[in-house]
Amino acid sequence: MDEGSRVDILKMYPEKKFCTKCRENKLRNEYYDHPGTADGKSSFCKACMITANNANRAKNKANGSYRNYNQIRDAKKEFFILNAF
């Protein structure tokens, strides 16, 4: 698809966009902004992005690559308190 036809499609349907994840046409305000794309919106709708992020987070938590930020923060505090003076 060349640049001219993409612009023509945006002119024809300015309020709708096709989600490549759930394969539905949705309003453009149901997409996050993404400056790297031609139309300035992400290719997944907000609902699909949230679902994908939650699934990724759960997968990372299950295989141990998810950090326990509270534990790390507490360890740093303790280190600095013990080594301050």
Image (cartoon, rainbow, N blue to C red):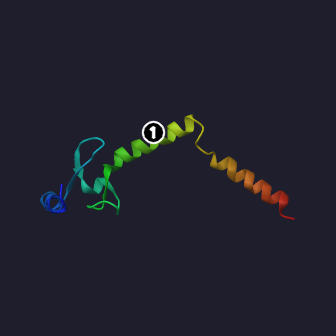
Note whether 41 is above or below 71 in the view shown. Answer: below
Q: In which quarter of the image is residue 65?
A: top right
Answer with the quarter of the image where residue 38 lies.
bottom left
Q: Of all residues shown, which one is farthest toward the right?
A: 85
**Residue in the picture at 38% in, 47% down:** 49
| Residue at 41% across, 42% down | 52
User: Callout 1: few (<14), some (14-19), or many (20+) C-alpha neighbours within 10 Å?
Assistant: few
Quadrant location of the N terminus?
A: bottom left
Picture coordinates of residue 76 (x, y %)?
73, 55
The amino acid type, in three-letter code, at marker 1 is Ala
Residue placed at 27% from the left, 47% from the top? 19
- Locate residue 11, reporting x and y percent: 14, 62
The reply, left or right, for residue 19 in relation to residue 52 is: left
> Which residue: 51% across, 37% down?
59
Q: Nearer the viewer, residue 4 or 17?
A: 4
Position of residue 46 in the picture relative to residue 81 (left or right): left
Using residue 9 as the reference point, say whether residue 68 is left or right of it: right
Q: How many labels does the image show?
A: 1
Report helix, strand or loop for mark 1.
Answer: helix
Q: Determine whether 60 is above or below 8 in the image.
A: above
Q: Where is residue 57 in the image (x, y as percent from the top left)?
A: 50, 42
The answer to which image quadrant residue 55 occupies is top left
Task: Give the residue pinned by disc 1.
Answer: 55
Is 81 placed above or below 71 here? below
User: Quick one: quadrant of the C terminus?
Assistant: bottom right
Q: Is residue 8 left or right of residue 63?
A: left
| Residue projecting furthest to the top | 62
